[in-house]
Amino acid sequence: MRPAGMRWTRGREQNICAGNRSEEVWMKRLITRVWIGSLIVLVFLSPMVCAMDGNAVLNKVDEVLSASTTSVASATMTLVDRGGQARERGMVVWTKHFKDKDDWSLLKFTSPAELRNLGFLSLADDQMYLYLPAFDRVRRIASTARKESFAGSDLSNDDLSTGKYTHHYDARITQETETVYVLDLDRKAGSDRIYARVRAWVDKERFTVSKMELYEDTDKLWKTSEMVHEQIQGYWTPVQITMKDVTKDHTTIMKITEIAYDTDLDDSVFSTRYLKRNVKVD
């Protein structure tokens, strides 16, 4: 026979074990409920938080293009005809970026001699000017002249405008991979942009555009554009742009040879008066 004290201890142990089992069951149920609740939140809220629609992606593209305050770039423009004959020009481009309106841009040719000082100024999508040094005259570019080739290149006056994509296009995501969004951009009603539809390949991480297909109407492909980007001073920079007019089998390649960001540029640089100034050639 065991002492009475021993029987009391055993009973107490039994009560403790039973209590522990109850707590264990309760904890398991609580953990299960929390886990299920968390899963429901992830399933239903994650798409709302993470998913982006086409216009949101396009807005990110605009933000990357206008990320710096200013830039000054030296570049070459090479024109290649269907026979492979190439002609090269030199130029300088000054740009001032804005978050809430169209950027400003001034382009001046430095070479060859017959094109030196020819310039292009864009202050808004509907406010563009061309300087013709042979006549010492500044001409405002009318909406009817947006399709015209700029200095014989495959870039039109419209291509050089600094209006933001989101101001002129509605975007839809038509394809998606792990690394790329493919956007279809449809021109908004009332926009003067010459391309009725644009297809763009956008890097998911950088929000840079690697390729574009430019359509004169919804079905007729007019041009293609391919871009190579490098990160310079912390900004993703299109160091090479290859524009091809598929209707003429003619190509224009623009390469940035030097660029500086966030330099001190006075607003007076972006004026028709400055557009007429002779560019300095090293």
Image (cartoon, grey):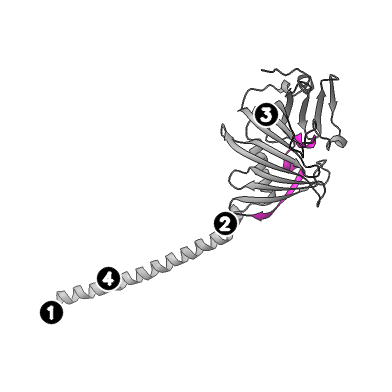
First reached walking from the N terminus: tag 2 or tag 3: 2
* Crowding near the residue tagged with mark 4, few <14, some 14–19, many ≥20 C-alpha atoms within 10 Å: few
Residue located 71% across and 31% down the image: 77
Q: Is residue 161 visible?
A: no
Foreground residue among 150 and 45: 150
Q: Return the mark for residue 16.
A: 4
Which residue in the structure is indicated by mark 2?
A: 46
Residue 279: image quadrant is top right
Instruction: Find numbered disc 2 in the image and state the secondary structure of the residue it sits on.
Output: helix
Mark 3 vs mark 1: in front: 3
Foreground residue among 132 and 268: 132
Left or right of 208? Residue 142 is right
Disc 2/disc 4 C-alpha distance (Å):
44 Å
Q: Is residue 173 above or below residue 132?
A: below
Q: Amino acid at mark 1?
A: Arg
Quarter of the picture containing the N terminus is bottom left
Disc 4/disc 3 C-alpha distance (Å):
82 Å
Left or right of 176? Residue 127 is right
Foreground residue among 33 and 202: 202
Q: Amino acid at mark 3?
A: Ala
Q: Amino acid at mark 2?
A: Ser
In this picture, which residue range is highlighted in magenta?
A: 153-178
Q: Is residue 184 above or below residue 30?
A: above
Disc 1/disc 2 C-alpha distance (Å):
63 Å
* Crowding near the residue tagged with mark 3, few <14, some 14–19, many ≥20 C-alpha atoms within 10 Å: many
* Crowding near the residue tagged with mark 1, few <14, some 14–19, many ≥20 C-alpha atoms within 10 Å: few
Q: Return the mark for residue 75.
A: 3
